[in-house]
Amino acid sequence: MGKKLIGIAVIILMLFGVVGLTACAPEEEKVELKQGFYNTEDGIGSIRLYGDNLFSFSIIYISNLSTGNYSVNNDKLVLKYSTDSELHFEIGDDQVTFIGAMEEGLFVEEGPVSVGKEFKFVGSTTQELRQGVYSTDDGLSSITLYGENEYIFNRHIATSYRPTGNYSVTNGKLLLHVADDEPFIFNIEKEELRFANETEPLVPSGTLFRLTNQLP
């Protein structure tokens, strides 16, 4: 009888010990991920997190602007980059660091930027650009920014082809993304845009576009 009581006492003490350890164990801190703009220091890349877990991801040497939904799993930011691809980032203190991609179910340490590339948080509104019509002083060329980061680029009234698509803003530059081509790049100077491409025959590099009609 005595041995049974001792055994029961030991079990009770063990149970209380487990409960006590569980109660005293510190709660795991959740990593905070702010919505807004995350940029690389060299100006190559930008991530925007906004709305209902939406993102846009732009790399200056890639023409397409990637958009979609993001998620946060195990302190990792995951961008749904394409149907079969995800980009994974380690979440740090006001920054995210690229660690690799999930390609068709396999994790690989490669992607559109080098592993270890850091994207630092720069704010939620610092890169907003007023939407509307930006025109050259002679009225021959214009850019219309509207909607969900959409644009129409009228390079010259003499041509009927007007590139359209999505735009992004990163490190003081406006990028007009064109499928299968390099983006059109403009330096942002307050409410003016200065064309930066060197190889566009219809618009000389350095051409200035001023905001002439702001959208409500």
Image: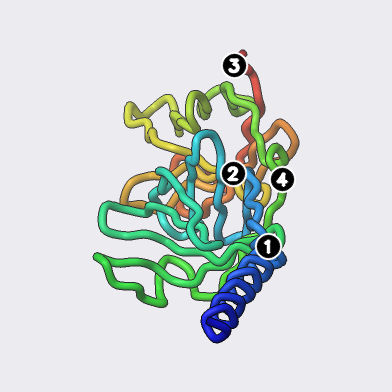
Q: Name the residue under label 3.
A: 215
- Find numbered disc 3 in the image and state the secondary structure of the residue it sits on: loop
Q: Mark 4 points at which residue?
A: 123
- Rounded to the nearest angstrom, the CA distance separating label 3 from label 1 is 57 Å
- Rounded to the nearest angstrom, the CA distance separating label 1 from label 2 is 48 Å
Q: Mark 1 points at which residue?
A: 23
Question: Which numbered marker is on residue 125?
Answer: none
Mark 2 nearby-residue class (10 Å; few <14, some 14–19, many ≥20)? many
Q: Which amino acid does label 3 sit on?
A: Leu
Could you tell which of marks 3 and 1 lies nearer the N-terminus?
1
Q: Which residue lies furthest to the front in this view?
A: 1
Q: Mark 2 points at which residue?
A: 169
* In this rendering, the label closer to the viewer, 1 or 2: 1
Q: Which amino acid does label 4 sit on?
A: Gly
* In this rendering, the label closer to the viewer, 3 or 1: 1
Residue at 50%, 35% (x, y): give it: 52
